[in-house]
Image (tube, rainbow, N blue to C red):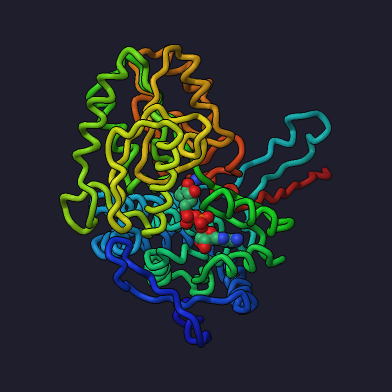
């Protein structure tokens, strides 16, 4: 595989990949310096040729075969996600399943989304012309991914890029790069020429140098706002796809099915220890049912078992590092000083931070305004529907939102008025299906992922027009 070949070329630093639960060493990968970028680009250049030479049926076959290989090895993939990202068994298994689906969907795009006929005769003056547009590769794409879905978010970049005939230099998170490497191994075993995906393991400096490279046609980035802004500044004239953070609101109206709503919201808030870009962070609950909702929500949240993700009874695994858990704790401490009331949680042991619920959180606090990306959720009562919509829309960025109600009119009104890339009705914000367009509104999102949409971002139309001179 590319990384091992490149690793042999590097004498020097390694990155130790640690298990977030107990800080034990899982594996090491090369810490490629920025000086390695010319070599990576040379490999990428070969990949551009190799990928464009693959007919669409071969791209589809390779993606389908890779999906089969991952399915066959699902247990090992799940174990790796648990080890390097701290997800629980249930969460890791789900991510593997979704990755298989993402690759299958990508194969379908390779087969079906080749372009369209252009109706030149639709307007006067072009009657003698006929033609079409095809979807052509962009060339070399740099894909940069975060730690929190270390397999499926990588598949969301590699699948559509390969389907579109591109080559990719992939820089996975230095905190959790192993699932990505195993995914690339499966693609190569399925017949992908090695040069088509080059894995570049390293940190921010390597990322910066790749972003700045002139021959790269697109940066497809998923990660935090600050990093996104750095990338946008350093990229120059190339296509950018940005999938950044969230601070998802969920509105709960008094006519909802209370038990089902509470259960769904607890999952939405604490899935993957809250390290989830569409995880529910602010629960806006109609005042008439607020006490009943709060009682049930806190009861269920405080029963969640936080700890070793390898154990079947664990609901909330560790955060990615002890420092990340300390940061979350500090944001909550700050909110408490500003007058918030703690309802449960706020207990930390190493990287494990218990499911934490607060109310009366100051709307100027970091906890209310910024993405917390931790198992922390805020409850907030409201009186009027309009007030809930305004609170939902307050941040300058958004990904998903949710609303629980049996009133169709209110549900549709919320769907129209909430500024978000997705509004889930009778689901928490934490629902995603890999075929749907995925992204956000306002600041913090450029373009859409979701296989068909990423494929379209990663290809460019080329028009062929025939003028019939007779
Ligand atoms: P991060 O921004 O710290 O890192 C993401 C990647 O960027 C890593 O591979 C990192 O090495 C690289 N990087 C860091 N600095 C760089 C630079 N200057 N130039 C180029 N690359 C650089 O994010 P993270 O902490 O790994 O992930 C958490 C964030 O990701 C959260 O904000 C979360 O909301 C977001 N996220 C978004 C989505 C989405 O689809 N919208 C999905 C998952 C996670």
Is 461 or 382 nearer to us in this picture?
A: 382
Is residue 320 positioned above or below 15 on the image? above
Q: Is residue 268 visible?
A: yes
Is the residue 53 above or below the residue 124 in the image? below
x, y percent for residue 45 = 63, 72
For the N terminus, which image quadrant? bottom left
Residue 205 to residue 325: above or below: below
Q: Is residue 12 left or right of residue 255?
A: right
Number of callouts in the render? 0
Q: On the rendered structure, is 73 left or right of 127?
A: left
Residue 288 x/y as whole percent? 32, 12
Looking at the picture, does residue 174 appear above or below residue 320? Answer: below
Q: Is residue 111 visible?
A: no
Q: Quadrant of residue 238?
A: bottom right
Q: Nearer the viewer, residue 147 or 100?
A: 147
Q: Where's residue 44, x and y in %?
A: 59, 71
Q: Position of residue 273 (x, y in %)?
A: 33, 47
| Between 452 and 325, the one nearer to me in the picture | 325
Q: Quadrant of residue 211?
A: bottom right
For the C terminus, the quadrant is top right
Residue at the spot 35% in from the left edge and 50% down from the top edge = 98
Question: 318 or 32, which is in the foreground?
Answer: 318
For this orientation, the residue located farthest to the front is: 337
- Residue at the (48%, 45%) spot, across then down: 450
Q: Is residue 162 left or right of residue 128?
A: left
Residue for point 28% across, 52% down: 317
């Amino acid at each position: 595989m590319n990384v091992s070949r490149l690793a042999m070329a590097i004498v020097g630093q390694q990155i130790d990949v640690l298990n977030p639960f107990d800080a034990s060493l899982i594996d090491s990968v090369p810490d490629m310096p920025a000086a390695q970028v010319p070599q990576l680009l040379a490999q990428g250049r070969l990949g551009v040729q190799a990928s464009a030479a693959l007919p669409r049926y071969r791209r589809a076959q390779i993606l389908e075969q890779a999906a089969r290989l991952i399915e066959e090895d699902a247990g090992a993939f799940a174990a790796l996600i648990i080890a390097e990202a701290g997800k629980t068994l249930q969460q890791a298994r789900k991510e593997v399943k979704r990755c298989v689906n993402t690759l299958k969907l990508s194969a379908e795009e390779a087969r079906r989304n080749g372009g369209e006929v252009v109706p030149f005769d639709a307007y006067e003056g072009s009657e003698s012309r006929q033609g079409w547009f095809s979807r052509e590769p962009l060339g070399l794409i740099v894909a940069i991914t975060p730690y929190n879905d270390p397999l499926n978010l990588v598949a969301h970049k590699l699948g559509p890029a390969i389907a579109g005939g591109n080559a990719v230099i992939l820089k996975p998170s230095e905190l959790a790069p192993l699932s990505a490497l195993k995914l690339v191994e499966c693609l190569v075993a399925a017949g992908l020429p090695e040069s088509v995906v080059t894995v570049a393991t390293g940190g921010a400096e390597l990322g910066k140098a790749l972003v700045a490279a002139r021959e790269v046609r697109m940066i497809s980035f998923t990660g935090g706002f600050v990093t996104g802004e750095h990338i946008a500044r350093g990229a120059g004239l190339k296509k950018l796809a940005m999938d950044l953070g969230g601070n998802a609101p969920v509105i709960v109206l008094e006519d909802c099915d209370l038990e089902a709503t509470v259960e769904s919201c607890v999952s939405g808030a604490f899935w993957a220890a809250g390290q989830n870009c569409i995880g529910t962070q602010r629960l806006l609950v109609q005042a008439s049912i607020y006490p009943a909702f709060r009682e049930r929500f806190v009861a269920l949240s405080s029963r969640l078992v936080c700890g070793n993700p390898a154990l079947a009874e664990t609901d909330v695994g560790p955060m990615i590092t002890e420092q990340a858990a300390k940061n979350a704790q500090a944001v909550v401490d700050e909110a408490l000083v500003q007058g918030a009331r703690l309802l449960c949680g706020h207990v930390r042991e190493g990287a494990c931070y218990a499911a934490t619920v607060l109310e009366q959180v100051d709307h100027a606090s970091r906890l209310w305004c910024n993405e917390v990306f931790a198992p922390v959720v805020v409850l907030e009562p409201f009186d009027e529907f309009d007030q809930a919509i305004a609170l939902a829309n307050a941040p300058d960025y958004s990904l998903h939102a949710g609303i629980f109600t049996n009133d169709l009119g209110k549900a549709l009104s919320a769907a129209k008025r909430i500024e978000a890339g997705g509004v889930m009705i009778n689901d928490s914000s934490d629902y995603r299906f890999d075929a749907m367009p995925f992204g956000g509104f306002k600041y913090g999102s450029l373009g859409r992922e979701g296989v068909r949409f990423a494929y379209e971002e990663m290809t460019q139309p080329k028009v062929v027009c025939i003028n019939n001179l007779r």
